[in-house]
Amino acid sequence: MDRFVRANLVNGISGLKSANLIGTCNTDGQTNLAVFNSVMHIGANPPLLSIMIRPHSVARHTYENLKATGYFTINAIDKNLVERAHQTSGKYDKGVSEFITCQIKPTFSDIHPAPYVAESPIQIGLKVEEEHHINSNQTILIVGRIVEINFPNGGVKVDGHLDLPALNLSAVNGLDTYCQATSFRQMPYVSRESIKN
């Protein structure tokens, strides 16, 4: 296959993924923002999420910042944020903040030092717990422990499930095809007693 066709196929073959902006800052307080499609749930107790970072063969400001400070944020992208969020995928110089360049407003909390995206409907603050290097392709898996979560009133149901239509979340296929996240059916928990033999 042509290398670009192959890359598009492999990047999208696993289906829809959550679309998120990862916020970091360096030790001087310089903010950084980058769109990611590789956020993965690791576990609920303790509450862990991970992100995959491409090989550190070139400058990776997100990786360098979270290594220096130990903190990062995961910010969900809603439909109204897609165009500006996608612009953060550009290769900006180290001294340039994507928050400013892409016209996205940063916000900070009292208990977490990395910047959140003010326009994001779900803001997750994390502390780096582990780092794993993938030998097969030199990518880096960063595992973070959730420190805090911010979401709007009505964004989470009483049972803890997200209210997807209310949050207006976007998903992504591959690197550049954004979709609207919705739900059509919530299935009951399958207990041992409910299994039909």
Image (tube, grey):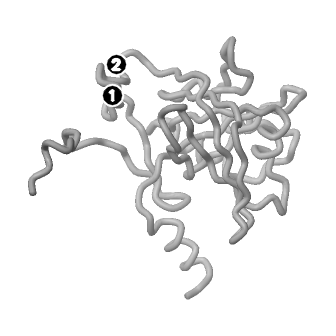
Q: Secondary structure at mark 1?
A: helix
Q: Residue sitting at 38 percent across and 30 percent down?
A: 167
Categorize mark 1 by other alpha carbons within 10 Å: few (<14), some (14-19), many (20+).
some
Quarter of the image for the C terminus: give it. bottom left
Question: Which residue of the protein is positioned furthest toward the left in this rendering?
Answer: 196
Q: Residue sitting at 55 percent across and 47 percent down?
A: 39
Q: Which residue is mark 1?
A: 166
Q: Which mark is drawn over residue 154?
A: 2
Residue 168 horizontal/vertical position (percent): 38, 34
Amino acid on which the number 2 mark rests in the picture:
Gly
Left or right: 58 in relation to 133: right
Question: Which residue of the protein is positioned furthest toward the bottom in this rendering?
Answer: 1
Q: Of label 1 and label 2, which has the lower sequence position? A: 2
Left or right: 113 in relation to 73: right
Question: Which residue of the protein is positioned furthest toward the top in this rendering?
Answer: 110
Left or right: 31 in relation to 38: right
Amino acid on which the number 1 mark rests in the picture:
Ala
Residue 56 horizontal/vertical position (percent): 81, 58
Q: Residue sitting at 49 percent across and 74 percent down?
A: 9
Assess whether mark 2 and mark 1 are in contact (beta carbons under 8 angstroms).
yes
Q: Residue sitting at 75 percent across and 37 percent down?
A: 32
Residue 97 horizontal/vertical position (percent): 78, 36
Task: Give the camera-side residue of 27 and 87.
Answer: 27
Categorize mark 2 by other alpha carbons within 10 Å: few (<14), some (14-19), many (20+).
few
Location of residue 87 with respect to 167 vertically, above or below: below
Task: Give the camera-side residue of 10 and 49.
Answer: 49
Location of residue 132 with respect to 30 vertically, above or below: below
Left or right: 193 in relation to 38: left
Q: Quadrant of residue 26?
A: top right
Quarter of the image for the N terminus: give it. bottom right
